[in-house]
Amino acid sequence: MKKGWDIKTLGDIGRVSMCKRILKNQTLPIGDIPFYKIGTFGKIANAFISNKVYEEYRSKYSFPKKGDILLSASGTIGRRVIYDGEPAYFQDSNIVWIDNDEEKVLNEYLFLFYGFCDWNPSKGATISRLYNDDLRRIKIPLPPLPEQQRIVAILDETFTAIAKAKANAQQNLKNAKELFESYLQGVFTSAGSATENKGEGWEEKTLDEVCEISSKLIDPKKKEFQNLIHIGAGNIETKKGTLADLKTAKEENLISGKFLFDETMVLYSKIRPYLMKVVNCNFQGLCSADIYPLLPFKDKMTKDFLYHLLLTKKFTDYAILGSQRAGMPKVNREHLFAYRFNLPPLNTQQTIVQKLNALNVETKKLESIYQQKIKDLEELKKSVLQKAFSGELKTVRGEV
């Protein structure tokens, strides 16, 4: 520990407080005073209580003052906000604060420490819980007040720069994703509607004219299918077409009928079409009966063109429109195959797909760069906090 610093518990520097429970298991009297949970403080009140109840409890029990740090003690432990002093009441036992000795610790320093602290909460019966005694025992490195002021000033400047850099990276990530999306939608504009201008050689088609579902349901318990990979809707990542957590029919102990698919097909999940779960297959396997294995006619449409078509906004809007029903949104075959669009010649399809694939590769590279940048900024923030509370903080200017 740096010379001149001390180690104190939060109980040493102040008093742990919380709001008193109001009318347990009863309806709150309606009034004008907002009643908040930590996650909704300053946004949407959970209820409103009367001024009479508010004043009664405020006069009897501990209450935060303007500028105090409210801290969540259950659920998401350590979530914190600054109390603005406006009349409000808070969910009992779920929100606590430290009435700290301001001659020992700055509120701003304590707020930053709360963001750094490893709460290690006790475990309740169903959810994590930070009890008052837990909070009192948490140790805080405590430098003299001038050093606290210096740390707060440096962290404020640093975190502002990090937030700006992170916002720029997030915007660049968004731009990278929109670049491919814009080109995809633009390419398929003439393919998306029979009423729009057609390119040279383009013909109006319905999906049933260019592809089919030739697969039949098979029994996954049969030996010849036991080692095949099974794909369910839950294995398909939204809008990406990538697969996760795959297992064989044997590993999943499948018993109900499944479709057999191969590398000539495109898989389309008919459940919740707004999720846009589409797979461009490159292997043989089994898929859920809630997935359509679409086989394009080789003389009409390429598999890659079909894959991209099913990911367009126009098709998705059409699928959503046809799935609006009570219960689970689901696209039936009749509606799916009735989709009308304009189809270019095969050589044009291949050219379009080549451009899309090339752009997709470049877009993925950009996404990877910006995602890593965002991750690095989060790690930098943690590193700066670590230095701050170990007495090693000098300056981080130029590191962002």
Image: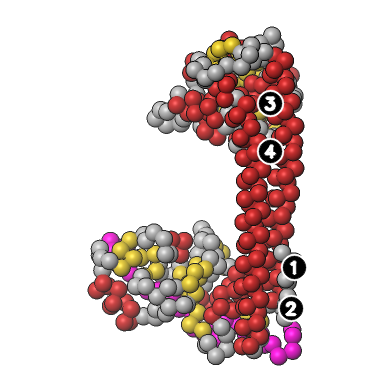
Residue 245's disc number: 4
Going by the numbered disc 4, the residue's amino acid type is: Asp
Q: Tell me residue 355's x, y (percent).
A: 72, 28
Q: Which residue carries the number 3 mark?
A: 280
Whichever of callouts 4 and 1 sits on the residue coming sooner in the sequence is 4
Q: Residues within 10 Å of mark 2 (few under 14, many from 20)?
A: few
Give whichever of 88, 9 is nearer the camera.
88
C-alpha distance separating marks 2 and 1:
12 Å
- Foreground mark, 2 or 1? 1
**Mark 4 near mark 3, Cβ–Cβ under 8 Å?**
no
Q: Quadrant of the N terminus?
A: bottom right
**Mark 2 near mark 1, Cβ–Cβ under 8 Å?**
no
Q: Tell me residue 244's x, y (percent).
A: 68, 37
Position of residue 34 in the picture relative to residue 380 (left or right) = left
- Foreground mark, 2 or 4? 2
Going by the numbered disc 3, the residue's amino acid type is: Asn
**Mark 2 near mark 4, Cβ–Cβ under 8 Å?**
no
Whichever of callouts 3 and 1 sits on the residue coming sooner in the sequence is 3
C-alpha distance separating marks 3 and 1:
45 Å
Q: In terms of secondary structure, where does tag 1 sit?
A: loop
Give whichever of 116, 151 is nearer the camera.
151
Q: In terms of secondary structure, where does tag 4 sit?
A: loop
Going by the numbered disc 2, the residue's amino acid type is: Lys
Whichever of callouts 4 and 3 sits on the residue coming sooner in the sequence is 4
Q: Tell me residue 319's x, y (percent).
A: 50, 25
* Span highlighted in magenta in the image: 1-28
Q: Residue at x 72, y 58 (%)?
A: 376
Position of residue 391 in the picture relative to residue 214 (left or right) = right
C-alpha distance separating marks 4 and 1:
41 Å
Q: Which residue carries the number 2 mark?
A: 394
Going by the numbered disc 1, the residue's amino acid type is: Gly
